[in-house]
Image (cartoon, helix red, strand yellow):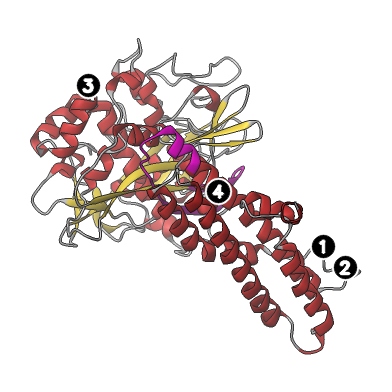
Amino acid sequence: MPINLLDDPWMPVRRADGRPDTIAPWQIAERTNPVVAVAAPRPDFNGALWQFLIGLLQTAFAPADDEEWFERHENPPSPETLRKTFDRYRDAFYLDGDGPRFMQDRDGLDGQKPLPITALLIDTAGSSTHFVKDLPTQGFSPAMAALALFTLQTNAPSGGVGHRTSVRGGGPLTTLVVCTPDEAHPRQPTLWDSLWLNILGASAFAGPRNRPEDIFPWLGPTRVSDKTGVTTTPQDVSPLQMFWGMPRRIRLLSEETGEGECGLSGAKTNLLVREYRTRNYGTNYPAETWHHTLSPHNRDAKQALPAHPRGSINYRHWLGLAQQADDNKTQRIPAAVVDAFYRRRLHREGLRFRLWAFGYDLENMKPRCWYEATFPLFRLETTDARQSLEAAADAMVNAAWEFLGNLRGCLKDAWFARNDPRRSGADTAFVESAFWAETEPRFYDHLTDLAADAENTQRRRSHLHEWHTDLFRYTEQAFDRWVNASLIGDQTHPRRIAEARRNLRRFNHKTSIKKLLDMPTKDQAAA
């Protein structure tokens, strides 16, 4: 019997009592020992599961207005209600069989050379160097194959001529509002509590094209994008297709195995997917035409484009992900779901709210790393309060960049003579990584206190001055740490080290830093 992703239990989750389970999507609304987290064997699969469920809820169960949104967050539907609601689209969620297949091309792609199933994994692309050497031979269970397929289509990097990227371009940054427990209350947030925070009203996706084949592209002929093909914008299909984009033409090849085992999850299965076929020139989604509700965007005078991870995600990104920011001629705009969170001013006893950001840092087809992080969200009552907090955060981050630059430069001065050829190529990435990670707690301490009284000018100035002290102390300690760890034996040059340390102290009191942090400068003191 064909596998249906709405009917069959396939999603790995964890329940409130800590027990792992495998459920069908409609079971996320169960209230007895409720589901509290997804539990896939890979972090990118967990991100994909969240987006799958958000897309499903947004497509099939969107609230008519804010009143209905609040009602459903407070009182989730019964599992039976959700099952019946999803059933309207069940024909779009068959993973195999003779009809349309979930996220797969209608054409069987016969004649295309099969690829190993591991080529669906963005971080391995079928490489034989994967830590499980015989993973392609072992194969994936249907559940893991579905997740690998959805993850690729949702994040699709450039893959050579005609292999299209996702609706948001290759490797988009996704940001979701999530619930965390309030330390003062024992209540454990459910998965529903968090998923529903990322659902918008139905009117946000209104449009003239709303047939199932407009939402789920695999229900109709592929909109090919070769020389005679077309591009696909929200005006050509339903805006809901942003959750179900299918840039890659793929056909999974499954086989009966009797008693088998999934190479990724270890689950027992009688059906394995070891290969798939693919063809280029699938659906071409111009990223500038799609404003995905789960991604922040960078807007210039011409267009708004979805953001992408570039290195680790930390507090230097708070502005632009959790709050709006203006950088020269570019506006950094948080995702639509973040804007909706602020607008709704939701309060639930026992719940706190954070922003979860994640995605692949890609260099064309090459994945450099998967990154994820969470950030605090502050609900501010007035525009003035919001702007004041944003200005303080901007000043603190810019000052941090200055301190980091001083630290890196003075470390090079300590390590190398001016004419040492090794100086220009010295790698200080580890210094930067440690800096952002180790100064982050104090940044959020200051920001949390400022958010409690954002318009208090004296409090703002006090925290900016304390931030200067924090960074000054940190960079001195970091300088001593990295110099002592790196310079041994005949490489040690005490005079050079002492001079570099003096310069670090002097540079950290530069006028540019003092102006950023609203501190008196020499000119002001003289006046």
Residue position for label 1? 424
Q: Are marks 1 and 2 in contact (CB under 8 Å)?
A: yes
| Rendered image: mark on residue 421 | 2
Residue 126 seen by the camera: no
Between 44 and 199, the one lying in front of the other is: 199
- Which residue ends up furthest to the front in the rendered image? 527
Residue placed most toward the observer, 492 or 207: 492
Q: Earlier in the sequence, mark 3 or mark 1?
A: 3
Mark 1: amino acid: Ser
Left or right, residue 501 beside residue 257? right
Q: On residue 64, which mark appears? A: 3
Q: CA distance from mark 3 to mark 2?
A: 65 Å
Q: Is residue 256 magenta?
A: no
Q: Secondary structure at mark 4?
A: strand
- Earlier in the chain: of badge 1 and badge 4, it is 4
x%, y% of residue 486? 71, 79
CB contact under 8 Å: marks 4 and 3: no
Mark 3 surroundings: few (<14), some (14-19) or many (≥20) residues within 10 A:
few
Q: Which residues are magenta?
A: 359-388
Q: Quadrant of the N terminus?
A: top left
Work out whether mark 4 precedes mark 2 in sequence or the reverse, and give the earlier one. 4
Between the residue at mark 4 and the residue at mark 2, the CA separation in whole angstroms equals 31 Å
22 sits left or right of 224 in the view: left
The kind of residue tagged 4 is Asp
Find disc 4 in the rendering and name its residue.
361
Image quadrant of residue 258? bottom left
Instruction: Please check the rendered image and state whether residue 372 is part of the magenta-colored stretch, yes or no.
Output: yes
In the rendered image, residue 302, in percent from the top left (x then y), is placed at 62, 21
Select label 4 or label 2 by which is in front.
2
